[in-house]
Image: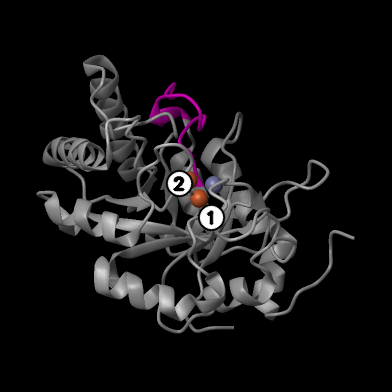
Amino acid sequence: MDKELYIGSHVSMSSPKYYLGSVEEAISYGANTLMFYTGAPQNSFRLPIEKLRIEEGRALLKANGFNEDKIIVHAPYIINIANQLNDVNYGMAKSVLLNEVKRTAAFGCKTLVLHPGSHVNTGVENGIDSIVKALDEVLDKDGTDVKIALETMAGKGSEMGTSFEQMAEIISKTKHPERIGICLDTCHISDNNYNINDFDKILDNVEKTVGLDKLLVIHVNDSKNDVGAHKDRHENIGYGFIGFDALNAVVHNPRIPGVPKILETPFVNEMPPYKEEIAMFKAGKFNDWRK
Ligand code: FE
Ligand code: FE
Ligand code: ZN
């Protein structure tokens, strides 16, 4: 195995075990990192941090030799900081984001993945402006060292975050560029016309726009659709249009060794696929486990 491969998946966090259960779930997949939401992904209701069994989860991480710096939190996807059509909504998005940044730090984690949001017919320039202002406001007052990883999106509707050039513009315009990076989702960028089969060319592009040091997380997903589809439908590794070999080359790419690789592929017959998929990447070989 590579010297510094961090591979894991999205895991759940639910009653009664909460974070302890999330860590147990990751271990059961043979993972050495994980990604979780600090509450439901689709809303902003959040249990108080004291209820989430964080100390027990962290103790289990330590006992199993996990590197906490590689663990990822995902912000709820209702946050939309990319337009200011409605002051109340924009204010709400910023306060939910501020709360999530603080919660990420309370778990001892360093990276929060955020969807950049939709400009909703107000135009890309306005989208960039709104995102920059919101990030500045949140990072002015959060008092943590958490980094926000803006996720590359599939380009549905008026989604922002559809190119590395746009990400670079956002990062360069903020007051806190050192605290912002990107999360590269293979399904999403394939949907945006980037060919994952030539991942080194994509990394060249990342290098000359945001910089390779800004690549904080990779979401490793196959896609149900062909390049450029703008659909955002994840597929199990090796069963989609990207394919196992291209994704395996992403996971083991020597230019980005320490970057955590996180699977967000769909369940099969209500069962998580992550144990099988992680094992395939560790072996570097496709295994037709779904048949
Ligand atoms: Fe996401
Ligand atoms: Fe993703
Ligand atoms: Zn997606």
Location of residue 71 with respect to 156 vertically, above or below? below
**Above or below for 220 versus 83:** below
Report the front residue among 6 and 52.
6
Amino acid type for the residue under numbered disc 1: Asp
Looking at the rendering, which quadrant does residue 247 occupy? bottom right
Residue 77: give x, y in percent of width and height: 44, 34
Q: Is residue 15 above or below residue 88?
A: below
Q: Main secondary structure of the magenta part?
A: loop
Which residue in the protein does label 2 denote?
A: 155
**Looking at the image, which residue is at 48% across and 52% down?**
59
Q: CA distance from mark 1 to mark 2?
A: 7 Å
Q: Secondary structure at mark 1?
A: helix
Q: Nearer the viewer, residue 198 or 220?
A: 198
Left-right relation of 205 to 28: left
Task: Name which of mark 1 and mark 2 comes first in the sequence.
Answer: 2
- Foreground of the two, 172 or 147: 172
User: What amino acid is at disc 2?
Assistant: Gly
Marker disc for residue 275: none
Left or right side of 62 for 220: right
Q: Which quadrant is home to the N terminus?
A: bottom right
Find the magenta span and give its range: 36-51
**Residue 76 placement (x, y as % from top left):** 44, 34
Q: Which is more toward the observer, 170 or 136?
A: 170
Q: What residue is shown at x 13% (from left), y 51% (from top)?
A: 173
Image point 28% across, 70% down: which residue? 213
Q: Tag count in the figure?
A: 2
Residue 191 circle label: 1
Around disc 2, counting alpha carbons within 10 Å, would you say few (fewer than 14), some (14 to 19), or many (20 or more)?
many
- In the rendered image, residue 105 lying in the magenta stretch gets the answer no
Give the SS element for disc 2. loop
